[in-house]
Amino acid sequence: MSYLTPRKRAEGRGPAHKGTAHHWSMIVSSVGLAILVPLFVLTFGRILGAPYEEVTAYFARPFPAIVAALTITVGFMHFKNGVQVMIEDYVGGLARQVLIIAMTCLSYAAAAIGLFAVARLAL
């Protein structure tokens, strides 16, 4: 026999029992992007419009390549989580599941293409 009321058992848990973790991951990625995006703009802005040889030499250095790779990775994961929340809030039924799967695949594919491009420039 349980002495907890249904309200007490449900307190602190969302419908999926993982809402808080998702919220914190969005906050952490937001803070990461607040730091990474200005760094990316500063590093990328210096080489914008330069010939290909200069760009490859610039991204062969570790700092610009790491900043670009981290910005791409964190940015697309933040995008994936944000769009997933939007889909969960406004779409229902089978369309919800299809859109979440499609958006997740699109996000991972775009992140992989971006990381491949940075790796190709850096190596």
Image (cartoon, helix red, strand yellow):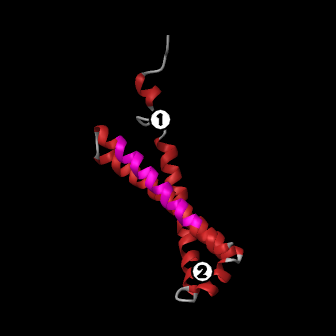
Tell whether position 32 is magenta. no
At label 2, counting other C-alpha atoms closer than 10 Å, the crowd grade (few under 14, some 14-19, many 20 or more) is: some
* Secondary structure state at the residue bearing disc 1: loop
- 88, 59: nearer the viewer: 59
Task: Give above or below for 18 relative to 25.
Answer: above
Contact between labelled residues 2 and 1, with CB atoms less than 8 Å apart: no
Residue pictured at 54% horizontal, 79% vertical: 41
Q: Which residue is mark 2?
A: 43
Q: Tag 2: residue type?
A: Thr
- Can you say which quadrant of the picture contains the C terminus? bottom right
Q: Sequence-wise, which precedes: disc 1 or disc 2? A: 1
- Between the residue at mark 1 and the residue at mark 2, the CA separation in whole angstroms equals 40 Å
Task: Name the residue furthest bottom.
Answer: 50
Magenta residues, dominant SS class = helix
Tell whether position 102 is magenta. yes
Measuring from the top left, give residue 61's x and y in whole percent.
Answer: 71, 77
Measuring from the top left, give residue 111's x and y in whole percent.
Answer: 52, 60
Residue pictured at 39% horizontal, 54% vertical: 83
| Residue 18 visible to an observer of this rendering | yes
Q: Is residue 48 left or right of residue 119?
A: left
| Residue 74 visible to an observer of this rendering | no
Q: Is residue 76 left or right of residue 51?
A: left
Measuring from the top left, give residue 95's x and y in whole percent.
Answer: 30, 42
Q: Which residue is mark 1?
A: 17
The magenta region covers: 97-116
What is the number of the mark on residue 59?
Answer: none
At label 1, counting other C-alpha atoms closer than 10 Å, the crowd grade (few under 14, some 14-19, many 20 or more) is: few
Task: Give above or below for 47 relative to 117.
Answer: below
Q: Tag 1: residue type?
A: His
